Amino acid sequence: MSLTHPFRALPLSALAISLASLAHAADLPVRPSAGDIVKLSKPADWRPLDPNNTLYMELASGRVVIELAPDFAPQGIANIKTLVKEGYFDGLAILRSQDNYVAQWGDPNAETKPKSLGSAKAKVPGEFTVPMANDKRFVRQQDADGYAPQIGHSNGFPVGRDPKAKTTWLAHCYGMVGVGRDNDTDSGSGAELYAVTGNAPRHLDRNITVVGRVVSGMPLLTGLPRGSEAMGFYGANEARMPIKSVRLEADVPEAERSHLEVMRSDAAIYKDVVDAARNRGGPWNKFTPHYVELCNAPIPVREHPKD
């Protein structure tokens, strides 16, 4: 389908028939919500988080769970794992909370008496895009987008794609985690990370290395007091949220793990979830645009059901 003919210009009969039959089978409304459809999912529609690519950031207020995306930033993630395994983040802090933008964490004394990076690298090449051929899991979302010729999801991560340049990249949606850097593209080591806590700043796409996304614990970051200094940094007299520890899930005892799973974005039911978000029904909605932005396409996360 050409991008000059977005989804809203296509006949909705096939979608209506699909959702109508789905609703009939489950005694749901003719136009069920995304939540209604998620309830119809089967175990095969979900995947567990990979313990070797999941981080637990323990704050005084609770746990933030971050799923890493090594297909998109292998060098940066390898360096972050080195920092984590050597305890670099333990005892550091949230440095910045900028309204409608990001929360950033790292070393409060980085400019005066920086903590040693240990055996981690001080500079890592920017991984702003990857070759399109490397992304074997891309499932296209049939909506137009102002930041990418094509959009979709890859293993649950929102991505943009440029077929002419043959590149793919992680998009700066809510909850995505990126590597802070200076002007040079290789100036980010992963020692300073941030999570998007406001409206998706998609202008950052292809300008910063994105390494994953928060799958649990976002309220702990969005609820932080805003910093009073420029860009939301905390001043000397403002309390910073301390980081108790950051651990790879694989290094955490089984009994202490969060046991989360994500809906597979290549599962047939996920297409229905996105379609429901695109074509909102129900008695409350009086107008639906038959369109959904990439960052508003829900990616369901749940605790693994107990046996």
Image: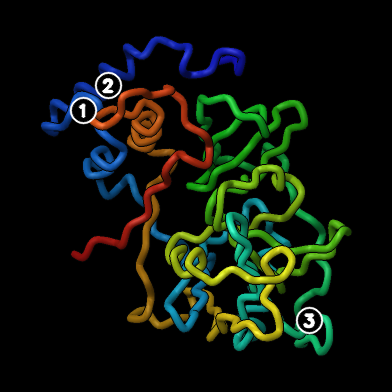
| Res. 158 image quadrant | top right
Mark 3, residues whose alpha carbon is within 10 Å: few (<14), some, or many (≥20)? few
Q: Disc 3 or disc 2, which is closer to the eye?
A: 3
Q: Earlier in the sequence, mark 3 or mark 2?
A: 2
Amino acid type at mark 2: Ser
Q: Is residue 180 left or right of residue 187?
A: left
Query: In percent of the image, x 48 and y 47: which residue is there?
Result: 156
**Spatial separation of the CA atoms under disc 1 and disc 2:** 6 Å
- Callout 2 secondary element: helix
Q: If the image is split into quadrants, where does the N terminus sit?
A: top right
Disc 1 to disc 3, how far (Cα)?
55 Å
Instruction: Name the residue at 26% across, 32% down.
Output: 284
How many numbered circles are shown? 3
Residue pointed to by mark 2: 18
**Mark 1 belongs to which amino acid?**
Leu
Mark 1 neighbour class, 10 Å CA radius: few under 14, some 14 to 19, many 20 or more: some
Task: Note whether 201 is above or below 179 in the view shown.
Answer: above
Q: Is there CB contact under 8 Å for labels 1 and 2?
A: yes
69 vs 272, nearest the viewer = 272
How far apart are the alpha carbons under marks 3 and 2? 55 Å
Which residue matches tag 3?
A: 110
Between 231 and 295, the one nearer to me in the picture: 231
Mark 1 sits on what residue? Answer: 22
Q: Residue at x 61, y 76 (%)?
A: 94
From the top left corner, tell me how far across and down residue 278 is, in percent.
Answer: 41, 29
